[in-house]
Structures are given as C-alpha cells and as structure tokens.
Amino acid sequence: MFSIANVNEKAVIAMESRDHFKNGVSPKDQMSRRFFVVIVLLLFCTLTVSSQTKTITVVPDNARIWLNGSEVAVGTYVIKFNNKTDFVMLKFYAPGYYVKTIKLFKTDPRKTISYNLQIDEAEANSIGGEAALNANRWVNITVKSKLDEDAAWKRLMATVTEYFDQIETRDKGAGWIKTSWITRDFGGVVQVRTMLEIKADFSGDGLGYRARLVSEIKWSGENSEGWQKYDRILKKYENVINDIQTRLGSGE
C-alpha cells in the first residue's frame, strides 16, 4: 500500500546509506534512526486524521443540530473535515432553550466538544399557545347594563393600575387608556416589554371598550433586530384582560 510513511522511509534509507559510506554509521545505528523516524511519521499521520474528525455533543441531549444550515442530528454528531474545509457553522436548538450558533474551525485541537444551551428565561416566565391568545390582539368588552360610564371608568382604572404603575394616556371623555411600557430583562440575552391599551367601543348600543395587551421581544448583541411582536405573555400580565372582563361585564 502506498503511504506517506513508505515514501519517507525509503528516503531515509537512501539518505542513511549515503551517510554510512561518508561517515561510517553502523547498520545498527541506521536501523535505530530509521525506526525513530517512521514512528514520528506515523504519529504525525494519526494526529492529522484525528484533528479532522470531531465529535459534537449538546446538553440537553434532545437538542437539534444544524450543520451549515441543514439539520443533521439530535444530541450528538461527528464532523469529518476535508482538505478544502477550514470551518463549519453549527446551530443548536431545544425547546425551552436559547438558540446557540458556533463557528468551529478544523484547527481546533479538541476531538470531542460539548456545548451547553442556556435556558430561555423569557419562555420560562411567560405563557404561550391557547393561553396567550390575547397577546397583541383587540378584545371586545361589553359593560354590564347596571354600570354607568363613571362606575365603569373607575373599575377600569382600578384594574389597570393593579398591573401597571405608569399611565401614559388617560382620557375619560375619549374613553382611552394607554400605559407606559414595562420592560423586563432576562440575563442580558433578551428583553420583553408589555403595554396595555384600552379605547371606547362605539360600535354597539351600550357602553363598551376594546382592550389590547401588547407584548414585544428584543434580542441582545449580534442577534438584535429591534423590537418584534412576541406571541407570549409574561405570567405577571396573563390575567389582566380577564380581570377587566370580569369586573366590567362579559367579553367576546
């Protein structure tokens, strides 16, 4: 079989034969030196092959793994670098954890590399799915017939201020309430901000309002794309719309 070790061994033998005649090196010394060189070459070849193969593991072990944009495995994956590839782009994701993106170079000396994903604190402290249907949508609130406008407004304001300390707009005549944003930071990775807006609804015969809980998220660092709609509601505000409906009347 042709190999780097064979070629180099022949070169060493030729060189040693020449040195033998010129310097009087004994055959025993030639064999010792040749054996040493071959061992070094074999070790070099082994290390070169090993450095081009890396085993990737991710915690938690149900994390999905993407290689250069394509999903390739779950939990663990073996990367084999070729001569034309200097690095690869890895992405990891598991439910309840932040996405992690890594640029892995072939020259990294590690043969086995483990990555730990960070828990998504924003998700852990919020609700989603069916429970968050009121996020970023207007909800109609019909006021009980026994409540006049003054009584309804007082109940409305009392409920809103239980959740929001600062009111940006308060106009009883126009039936409009808008709170200031309340922003919560989660470990410097993401921020979630929440705002409540209420306005009078003049489409029906009786007194009514429309309420909307606005939820937005912003990623920090290189992932930042500014504030975006967040389809989840922080647990602190999950009952605000329901409380307004209960205290003023029925909702639909």
Image (cartoon, grey):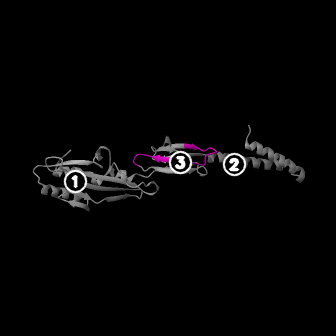
Q: Nearer the viewer, mark 1 or mark 3?
A: 1
In the image shown, does 113 or 146 lie closer to the viewer?
146
> In the rendered structure, does residue 89 fall within the stretch colored magenta?
yes
Percent across and percent down for residue 40 are: 72, 49
> In the rendered structure, does residue 130 fall within the stretch colored magenta?
no
Q: CA distance from mark 1 to mark 3?
A: 49 Å
**Amino acid, disc 3:** Met
Percent across and percent down for residue 14 are: 84, 46
Residue marked by disc 3 = 89
Q: CA distance from mark 2 to mark 1?
A: 75 Å
As drawn, the label of residue 163 is none
Would you say residue 239 is visible in this rendering?
no
> What range is drawn magenta here?
78-96
In the image shown, does 96 or 194 lie closer to the viewer?
194
Residue marked by disc 1 = 199
Percent across and percent down for residue 238 are: 27, 51
Residue marked by disc 2 = 44
Near mark 3 (Cα within 10 A), the count class, few <14, some 14-19 or many ≥20, is some
Q: Nearer the viewer, mark 2 or mark 1?
A: 1
**Amino acid, disc 1:** Lys
Left or right: 119 as drawn, with respect to 103: left
Q: Residue at x 79, y 48 (%)?
A: 34
Left or right: 171 as drawn, with respect to 95: left
Marked residue nearer the N-terminal end (2 or 1): 2
